[in-house]
Image (cartoon, rainbow, N blue to C red):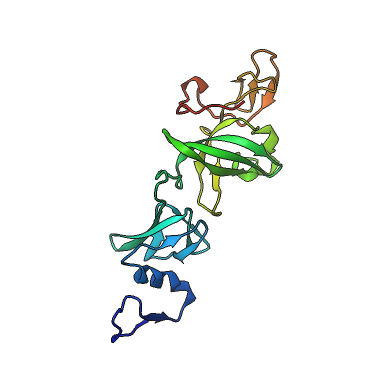
Amino acid sequence: ILTWFPNCPNPKVCCVFVSAEIWFKVILIVCSMENPICLPGQRLSICDNVYTCGQGTYQRQGYIYSMLAGTVDLVDRNGVKVIEVHSTGEQTVIPTQGDIVTAQVYIITQQFAKCYIKCIGSTVLRSPYRGLIRRENIRATEKDKTEVFKSLRPGDIVLARVLPMTEAHSYQLSTAENELGVVIAHSEHGYPMVPVSWTEMQCPKTLVKEPRKVAKIIPENIDTGGIVVDS
């Protein structure tokens, strides 16, 4: 609930509020003449039927947070206020929920695989985003039996789908679809492997097979957007 001071010479900045949950609604009004600046992970507003997430933001536990360091824009779309964050001078393409991305795994644990997102669809990113594939999001079935090291390895190139944001500095990804998973992988000896089933890939030189969560597509048709595959 906002209370305005009608006699104030600058009514844009003369208001008080009684609810902490709507504090950013006040900030948006206060800064209507100059877009406010925010930091990654900063809480911006409640998320309800009036205010919703836009580019550069994500929703968690009923609130809207910023993904980026940049300026906040409030866009009116059919009566809904869309909160967006734009980072000046940075790439404007960011992963959004439902996007298919190309990522490269760089570390694995028993619970997750960390990766760098290098392409969003067919768009190659100038700077990669960090992604996280949790064990339960690797396969669509038998999730409790899935083992990360039998599905993904460091250096693998994977196709994954972007899940709803839950953290400020990392995108949650899923390969739990037939068409998603490993598309390019190298053997322990550094040779590009070929899929022999949807759960294994084989080194053409040593003929050694390694377990993977293989994407059900033809690797030769994969467009990696010209990114360099680190073996």
Quarter location, residue 108: top right
User: As rendered, which of 219 and 25 lies closer to the eye?
Assistant: 25
Which residue is painted at 45% across and 28% down in the image?
225
Placement of 67 over or under 147, stated as above or below: below
- For the C terminus, the image quarter is top right
Residue 93 occupies quadrant: top left
- Position of 211 compared to 80: left or right? right
Q: Position of residue 140 (x, y in %)?
A: 58, 40
For the residue pair 104 and 29, the one nearer the viewer reads as 29
Position in image of residue 165 (x %, y %)? 51, 52
Residue 157 on image: x %, y % = 56, 30
| Residue toward you, 5 or 52 | 5
The relative height of residue 229 versus residue 62 in the rendered view (above or below) is above
Question: In this orientation, does residue 142 appear?
Answer: yes
At x 33% / y 85%, what residue is drawn? 5
Q: Position of residue 215 (x, y in %)?
A: 55, 30
> Residue at image x 50%, y 22%?
218
Position of the N terminus by quadrant: bottom left
